[in-house]
Image: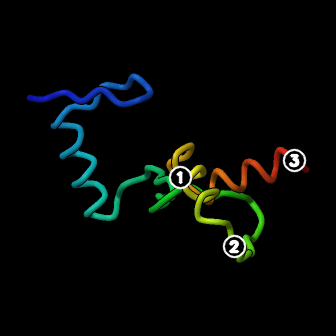
Amino acid sequence: MAEWKLANGYILTDEEIERRAAEYESGNWEGHLERIHQGRPPVSDEPLVPVTIKFPASMLAQIDAKAKNRSDYIRRVVAASL
């Protein structure tokens, strides 16, 4: 029987997984499911508005050399200047 250690330290066994699955499938499960968010985490709690801006190619190359994500880098630089 395999055991799985969860992030919170709880040890979950294959037997417990099977028991919980049977309860869920029969409609008798009283547990709680967290909402699962797919994709990247949100950048902000408020709506985002696209802004188009043009940069010289050399400046864009410098941004790309410094950052893995262009948009995130530009957002951080603008936020730091406000």
The amino acid on which the numbered mark 1 sits, given as a three-letter code, is Asp
- Per the image, label 1 sits on a secondary structure element best described as helix
Residue found farthest to the right: 82
Residue denoted by label 1: 64
Q: Residue at x 22, y 55 (%)?
A: 22
Work out whether residue 28 or residue 12 is closer to the camera in this orientation and state it: 12
Residue denoted by label 3: 81
Tell me the quadrant of the picture where the N terminus can be found: top left
Rendered view: 54 above or below 4: below
Q: Residue at x 50, y 48 (%)?
A: 68
Label 3 crowd (10 A; few <14 / some 14-19 / many >=20)? few
Label 3 – label 1 distance at C-alpha: 20 Å
Label 1 – label 2 distance at C-alpha: 14 Å
Q: Earlier in the sequence, mark 3 or mark 2?
A: 2
- Per the image, label 2 sits on a secondary structure element best described as loop
State left or right for residue 47 relative to residue 37.
right
Rendered view: 42 above or below 10: below
Q: Residue at x 73, y 48 (%)?
A: 76
The amino acid on which the numbered mark 3 sits, given as a three-letter code, is Ser
